[in-house]
Image (cartoon, rainbow, N blue to C red):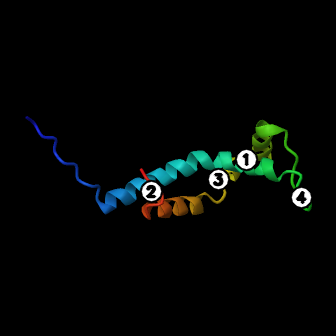
């Protein structure tokens, strides 16, 4: 009869490193989608000087033409920090 070796819990440093990597990946791929969603949600609000978009493709074309690709990543650094802190504190179960 063979016994399966007991797995050790990951070290604190490994947990922090993995949380940071997960935060960077998450924000890098999700933030542009969130920018498009937010632009669609706020279009036409009373009292705001916002543009009118024609769907998701319209938002992407307009943002790229007027502001460049970097506009999809404005505020990304804050989100990476916030995500990493939240994960490090046990906010998300793996």
Q: Is residue 74 left or right of residue 91?
A: right
What is the CA distance from the residue labelled 1 to the residue labelled 2?
25 Å
Residue 40 in the image, given as x and y percentages of width and height:
79, 47
Q: Residue furthest top?
A: 1
Residue 53 in the image, given as x and y percentages of width and height:
85, 43
The local secondary structure at tag 2 comes to: helix
Which one is closest to the eye, mark 3 or mark 4?
Answer: 4
- Specify few, some or many for label 2: CA neighbours under 10 Å numbering under 14, 14-19, or 20 or more: some
Q: Earlier in the sequence, mark 2 or mark 3?
A: 2
- Label 1 belongs to which residue? 37
- Label 2 belongs to which residue? 20
- Label 3 belongs to which residue? 73
The local secondary structure at tag 1 comes to: helix
Q: Is residue 80 left or right of residue 94?
A: right
Residue 93 in the image, given as x and y percentages of width and height:
44, 53
What is the CA distance from the residue labelled 2 to the residue labelled 3?
18 Å
The local secondary structure at tag 4 comes to: loop
Which one is closest to the eye, mark 1 or mark 4?
Answer: 1
Residue 74 in the image, given as x and y percentages of width and height:
66, 57
Q: Earlier in the sequence, mark 4 or mark 2?
A: 2
Residue 49 marker: 4
What is the CA distance from the residue labelled 3 to the residue labelled 4?
21 Å
What is the CA distance from the residue labelled 3 to the residue labelled 1?
13 Å
Q: Earlier in the sequence, mark 3 or mark 1?
A: 1
Q: Is residue 75 left or right of residue 20?
A: right
The local secondary structure at tag 3 comes to: helix
Closer to the camera in the image, 13 or 74: 13
Residue at 63 percent across and 50 percent down: it is: 31
Q: Is residue 72 left or right of residue 86?
A: right
Q: Earlier in the sequence, mark 1 or mark 4?
A: 1
């Amino acid at each position: 009869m063979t016994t399966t070796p007991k797995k050790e819990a990951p070290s604190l440093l490994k947990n922090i490193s993995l949380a940071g990597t997960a935060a960077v990946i998450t924000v890098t791929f999700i933030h542009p989608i969130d920018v498009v969603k937010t632009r669609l949600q706020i279009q036409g609000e009373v009292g705001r000087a916002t543009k009118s978009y024609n769907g998701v493709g319209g938002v992407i074309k307009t943002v790229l033409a007027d502001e460049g690709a970097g506009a999809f990543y404005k505020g990304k650094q804050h989100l990476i920090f916030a995500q990493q802190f939240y994960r490090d504190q046990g906010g998300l179960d793996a």
